[in-house]
């Protein structure tokens, strides 16, 4: 399943890849790697909210996965940066 997902991702079929990662996670519920790859896929698409959610799932299964930690940290910073920029824009507009 992971090979199918990785090939779909490499071929640019992101939804197919995400579906395959989710299927792998369902078949192997204690495995963290499908969640990490799903998080990476969302991160690359600048879908930081879903990247954080998938990273959290990975970290529940393996709290020492540095890739998941990194994705969560950077995604959180990017979401926070957007929020601050939105606040500043609203303040500037009055």
Image (cartoon, rainbow, N blue to C red):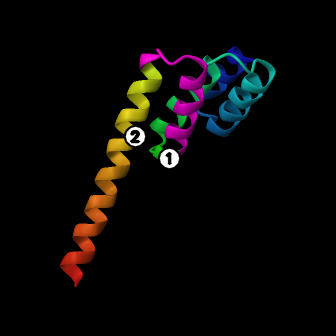
Does the magenta stretch mainly form a helix, a strand or a loop?
helix
Instruction: Give the structural element (helix, strand or loop) at label 1.
Output: helix
Res 27 → quadrant: top right
Residue at 78% across, 26% down:
26
Could you say which is closer to the camera, residue 88 or residue 38?
88
Point out which mark residue 73 bears: none
Work out which quarter of the rendered image holds the N terminus and state it: top right
Q: CA distance from mark 1 to mark 2?
A: 7 Å
Image location (x, y in percent) of residue 37: 57, 24
Residue 2: quarter of image: top right
Q: Can you say whether 18 is above or below 69 in the image? A: below
| Image quadrant assignment for residue 32 | top right
Instruction: Please count the marks in the image.
Output: 2
Q: Are marks 1 and 2 in contact (CB under 8 Å)?
A: yes
What percent of the width, then of the height, locates residue 60?
58, 25
Check residue 54 for magenta coloring: yes
Q: Residue at x 49, y 39 (%)?
A: 52
User: Where residue 91 sits: x, y (%)?
Assistant: 22, 76
Seen in the image, is 38 located left or right of residue 73? right
Q: Residue at x 34, y 46 (%)?
A: 78
Q: Which mark is residue 49?
A: 1
Residue 40 shown left or right of residue 13 in the figure: left
Q: Label 2: how many residues lie within 10 Å, few (<14), some (14-19) or many (20+)?
A: many
* Residue beneath the point at 47% across and 25% down: 68
Location of the C terminus by quadrant is: bottom left
Image: magenta residue range: 50-66
**Residue 75 - label:** 2
């Amino acid at each position: 399943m992971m090979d199918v997902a990785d090939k779909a991702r490499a071929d640019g079929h992101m939804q197919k890849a995400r579906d395959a990662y989710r299927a792998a996670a369902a078949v192997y519920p204690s495995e963290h790697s499908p969640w990490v790859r799903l998080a990476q896929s969302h991160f690359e698409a600048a879908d930081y909210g879903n990247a954080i959610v998938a990273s959290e799932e990975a970290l529940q299964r393996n709290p020492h996965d540095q890739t998941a930690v990194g994705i969560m940290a950077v995604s959180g910073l990017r979401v926070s940066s957007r929020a601050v920029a939105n606040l500043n824009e609203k303040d500037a507009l009055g």
